[in-house]
Amino acid sequence: MHESNGLKPTRRRIAVFSLGCKLNQAEGEGIRHLCGESGCEIVPFEAEADVYVINTCTVTSEADREGRRLARQARRRAPVGAKIILAGCSVQANPGGMLIPEADLLLGNAEKMRLPEHLASAVWRPDTELREEGAPAEVRAAAIGRRDELDVIPIEHFEGRTRAYLKVQDGCNFSCSFCATTLARGPSRSLAADDCLRHARRLAGGGHKEVVLTGVHLGAYGRDLKPRETLSRLLGRLIEEGGLRRVRLSSVEPGEVTRELVRVSAESAFGRKKTGAYACRHFHIPVQSGDDGILRAMGRNYTAERCARRFAELARVIPGICLGADFIAGFPGESAEAFDRTMAWVRESPIAYLHVFPYSPRENTPAAQMPGRLHGEESRRRVRALRELGRRKWAAFAASQIGASRLEVLIEGRRKDGLLSGLTDNYVRVAIDGPEEWIGEIVPVRLSSGGRGGAHDPAAGREEAILGVAV
């Protein structure tokens, strides 16, 4: 609470902004919920607030910079006495790199999920400083490697979102040479299947038709539980017992796209099931490279050929499936021939879209010490080439969906041009004419034409909607 011009106390205003993955978005929503439950007023990040929280991401150095930039931006517009908190992965992995003058407090990944406690433990009146002028911000980030529990906050509704993110797993036991995830997230740990069902039913009761299962290493779900569980069994139970209309998986590692997961996804996919909930025809798989030598240097546990076989199997058994993938361009030691093999892998695969990242050295990771890192124009050229190939792959996939007899679109909101915008189960952005009552509902649609230049336009990106007609 704070005093306002000597009048009665008013509720503390909290603004939270989450960067990065769907898991971080889920945690950000949980933080908002906790703060609201503790009596705070939740306001937009652009609004005037007493506390600004930046829930950071450390997947690349650019993500770290964005967290610091948002903190500086918040400080510039913040009222006198407002406090700035940097929280999450960047703080956990590299607290020294996030110690900037604009921040008052740094919280690690465990600590951010107890934000109201940290606010209560400090003097947070606007006329009181948390630290002496010139002193560095306090860092509260316990070693996450010792954690074995999973922080999941039960909520009913994701504010401003029609799709809800359900955190079922956190952490990673892999040691990929380029990744700081284990530093930021700790060991793999899972939420018990019965608790996953309970949270899913709560979200369904709050009006969500779709839940996206999230985790750092989602495919490792259940290995730490007793008795042992699997992602495929969890997916099957959520479809049958979760009270939802559809369930979507976030990123799944190539080695964890098991035959059982493929079977469950295929048997319960849209179009296969005539009634009830279904699995979305959408897999996002972080391939990272199409060259075996680079995959070994990255510490990945599969070959390009094995990954290609799994992609081909998914495309064969689930008609209309949308397959996406992450790729890193310019990894240390990536020769021109290795990059050409990655380009060929993408061209020959049934992949629909790419997320392409230039290699970004992360502090305290083995790859940061490897020789042969690309710099400058050649690195940028490879990123551009992969992204351009990804645009052409998406144009072909989008064109293949036009004229489909029936797709189901979850309507997310209204665009500036007055049309409604939503997403099919196989990840196609659709624009249709319809009433306000459709927002948050699933509407059967037939796709009719492309957006800018039509769906065949290779310059059209994945976010450019295809026009549809309700059927």
Image (cartoon, grey):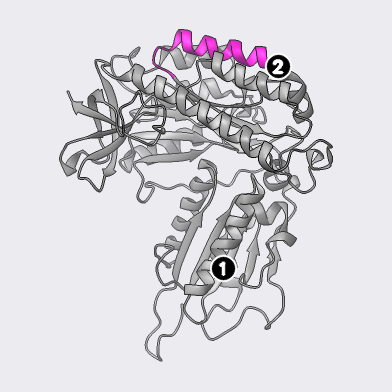
* Quadrant of the image occupied by residue 279: top left
Q: Position of residue 459 (x, y in %)?
A: 41, 31
The front one of 83 and 151 is 83
- Numbered mark located on residue 303 in the image: 2
N-terminal-most mark, 1 or 2: 1
Q: Is residue 266 among the parts visible in the rendering?
A: yes
For image coordinates 44% across by 56% down, the residue present is 33
For image coordinates 44% across by 13% down, the residue present is 266
Residue range in magenta is 302-321
Q: Position of residue 248 (x, y in %)?
A: 44, 29
Badge 1 crowding class, 10 Å Cα cut-off, few under 14, some 14 to 19, many 20 or more, is some
Drawn side of residue 59 relative to residue 420, left or right: right
Could you tell me which secondary element the residue under label 1 belongs to?
helix
The front one of 125 and 181 is 181
Q: Position of residue 244 (x, y in %)?
A: 35, 30
The front one of 242 and 255 is 255
Q: Is most of the magenta stretch helix, strand or loop?
A: helix
For image coordinates 72% across by 78% down, the residue present is 135
Determine the CA span between mark 1 and mark 2.
43 Å
Name the kind of residue labelled 2 in the image.
Thr
Residue that badge 1 annotates: 72
Is residue 174 shown above or below 313?
A: below
Could you tell me which secondary element the residue under label 2 belongs to?
loop
Drawn side of residue 63 relative to residue 294, left or right: left
For image coordinates 25% across by 48% down, the residue present is 416
